[in-house]
Image (tube, helix red, strand yellow):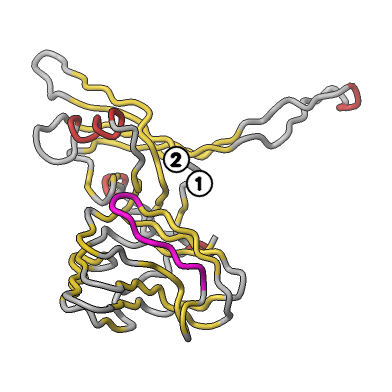
Amino acid sequence: MAKINGSDLLVYANGTLIAYQKSCTVSWEQELPDATAKDSGGWEEHLNGTRRCTCNFDGLFSSTGLSAAGLITYITGRTSCVLLIDGTGYPIVGEARPKNLSVNATMEESGSISGSFVFDGPAWMLSGDYVNLMTDPDAGGTDYDTMTVSGIKISSAVNDAGTAYVESNTASITTGDVCKVFFYCAGIFGNSPTVALYGTGNRSNVVTMVTGLNVMTLTADATSTLTLRITNSDASSWSTTNIYWFKV
């Protein structure tokens, strides 16, 4: 069994590394409402209650990179983000909101920050049944005028006029499969792209991409090897962070 160095686990908000991290803790927990009754034989009994996932982190204060100033804007702006914890060999990803942030300053010591995120819904560990299906965003072809891919993110997509598409690698999908798609888009200039599972035509509902956080739910209507297809119907330019596409 391979061991993991804790130094390799790093936290990213909307694709940007939180600067100078020292540690992070990801927790899954559930409430256990009391259900003990007279016939419990003197033992406590519980029901399964609400579940939650959190990520606590601390690091050094920095005047550059994503540090206190940038993280505070998530709180003041009341915005969520794609939170990614990477370095385990498989990513942990989900939509999360910052709960708190503290700046700590001790005489003659490095300034530090600490804070916590709470996930909206699950923190998905993308392995096993939830493995990330995305391996190459343009493996299935593209007719954008400019398409620059780095790993599993689209660094630049430019469509000068008319329609354009980009298709990912294929994945085996069954009718009724529900897929989640997570990524962050820094900006859309022109026509807003749409996203769908694709085979012989669209094989799921179609969702329109937005500037900012994109959390999409696509339900397949075919059993086939399908791609994740992004389409523009007019001139546009946009980019994404890493794209996470997985069955739930």
Magenta stretch: includes residue 209: yes
Please tell me whether mark 1 sits on a helix, a strand or a loop.
loop
Image position of 47 (left or right of 79): right
Question: What number is the disc on residue 11?
Answer: none
| In the image, residue 47 above or below residue 231 | above
Image position of 74 (left or right of 49): left
Q: Nearer the viewer, residue 108 or 200?
A: 200
| In the image, residue 200 above or below residue 156 | below
Rendering coords of residue 240 (x, y %): 26, 60
Q: Which residues are magenta?
A: 204-213
Rendering coords of residue 20 (x, y %): 18, 38
> Rounded to the nearest whole Å, what is the CA distance between mark 2 and mark 1?
6 Å
Q: Which residue is mark 1?
A: 122
Question: What number is the disc on residue 119?
Answer: 2
Circle 2/circle 1 CB separation < 8 Å: yes
Examine the image and state in which quarter residue 18 appears.
Answer: top left
Magenta stretch: includes residue 100: no
Residue at the spot 85% in from the left edge and 23% down from the top edge? 37
Rendering coords of residue 182 (x, y %): 39, 57
- Report the amino acid beneath label 2: Phe
Q: Quadrant of the N terminus?
A: bottom left
Tell me if mark 2 has few (under 14), some (14-19) or many (20+) residues whose alpha carbon lies within 10 angstroms of its own: many
Residue at the spot 38% in from the left edge and 74% down from the top edge? 229
- Report the amino acid beneath label 1: Pro
Residue at the spot 40% in from the left edge and 41% down from the top edge? 96
Counting every numbered tag in the picture gives 2
Q: Quadrant of the C terminus?
A: bottom right
Residue at the spot 29% in from the left edge and 50% down from the top edge? 212
Rendering coords of residue 16 (x, y %): 22, 48
